[in-house]
Image: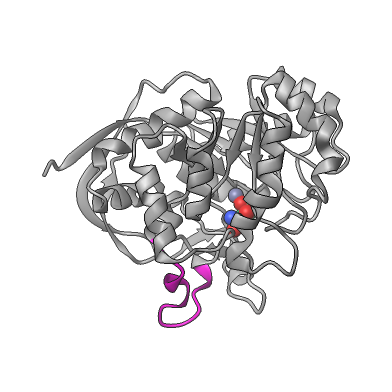
Amino acid sequence: MSAILTLPQPDDWHLHLRDAELLNSVVPFSARQFSRALVMPNLQPPVTTCEQALAYRQRILAAVPSGQAFNPLMTLYLTDRTNPLDITHAALSEFILAAKLYPAGATTHSEAGVTAIERIEPVLDAMQEHGLVLCVHGEATHASVDVFDREAAFIEQILTPLVQRFPTLKVVLEHITTREAVEFVENSPAHIAATITPQHLLYNRNTLFQGGLRPHYYCLPVLKRETHRQALLTAATSGNPKFFLGTDSAPHRRQDKESACGCAGCFSAPAALELYAEAFEHAGALDRLAGFASHYGADFYGVARNTATVTLVRENWQVPEAIPCNGDTVIPLAAGDTLSWRLRDSG
Ligand code: NCD
Ligand code: ZN
C-alpha cells in the first residue's frame, strides 16, 4: 500500500467557528486543513444580515495564522423575520453562498430559528430565484418524535413538500445520519445534495455509551445505529457527487459538554481529513476521497476546484487529548485515538 496520498486541497462545506477567543483558538485547525469553508451562522445573536456575515468573515480572516490562505464563505441564519431583500443582497456577494434553515429548537443555538416553514416562503422564493443555496438542519422538533427518528420525520413531513413547492431551489441536507436521508438525496434531482461528517462515517450510537456516557461524541443529529452508518459510508464512497465533505466541526468548552445538560457538537477540526481518510480506507475506497473531499462540494456551490494539493502520510499519530483555549479546554473528536494517516504540514 502506498505510504503517501496526495489530494487536491479539500474544502469544508459545514463548519462552526464561533466568535471571540474560541474563534481565535479554532480557526488555525481548519485553515491548516482546508482551502475554504462554509461557515455556519449560529452565533449568539445569530448572523442574519449580509453586513453581519461580512463583518464576521473579517473576524475569521483576522484569526488565520499568517502565511496561510483560508477563504471563509458565509451563510445567513434564517428566522421567521428574514427579509427577502437580505437574500437578494446576499446573492450579490461572492462571499455569501447560502442561508441556513434551523428549525427552532432543533440544535445548539437554534432558538431564533424558523418556527414554521410557511413563514419563510417569500424568502425561499427569493432564494430559488437568485440561486442562493438552502442549507438544512434536517430534524423534526416536535417533542413526540423519537430523537433517533427526527431526521426521517423531517424528510417526510417538511423536506419532501418543500422541494416540491420549490422545484429548482438548491438544497443541501446537512450532516445526514440515516439511510432515509441517503435515499432521499439519491432520488432527488442534481440540485439537491448532502454533507456527511466524519463522526457519522466512523461511529454508530453504541460509541456514545461505550464504557459510560461519552459527551464528546454527542452531536445533533445524534449518531444512529450501524445500518445507517453503513448506508452513509456507502454513499460517501460511491463517487456520487451529491455527497460531499462537511465536518460540522462544532467546538464547545469542555465544561459545557461535560455537564448535567451537555451541549451537542463534536470538534473534529484538528483531525478532520485524517478521520475521513480512516473511514474511506476501511471501506477500501481511498481513491474516492478526492472527489468527496475536494471536488463535489466546489462543483455544487459553483466555485472553482482548488489547484493546490495536500499530502497525507501513512503514519500513526495520536489525536491530542485536549486543546487549550484561552484558559479553557476543548476536547477534540477521537481524543487520544491513534490514527493511521497524518496530514503533512505545507511549507
Ligand atoms: C452544532 C453546534 O454546536 O453549533 N452542534 C451539533 O451538534 N452539530 C449545531 C448543528 O450543526 O446542529
Ligand atoms: Zn452544524
Residue 116 is one of the magenta-drawn residues: no
Identified at 20% across, 51% down, the residue is: 315
In the picture, measured across the screen, residue 16 lies left or right of residue 339, that is right
Residue that extends furthest to the left in the rendered view of this protein:
1
Assign the N terminus to one quadrant of the image. top left
Identified at 69% across, 57% down, the residue is: 140
Residue 211 is one of the magenta-drawn residues: yes
Residue 112, how many percent across, how many down? 81, 51
Identified at 24% across, 36% down, the residue is: 287
Boundaries of the magenta span: 203-216
Residue 223, how many percent across, how many down? 50, 63
Render colour scheme:
one colour
In the picture, measured across the screen, residue 254 lies left or right of residue 237, that is right
Identified at 73% across, 26% down, the residue is: 127
Return the residue nearer the eye: 328 or 30.
30
Residue that extends furthest to the bottom in the rendered view of this protein:
212
Assign the C terminus to one quadrant of the image. top left
Residue 168, how many percent across, how many down? 65, 25
Q: How many marks?
A: 0
| Vertical order, 226 against 244 (above or below) | below
Residue 68 seen by the camera: no
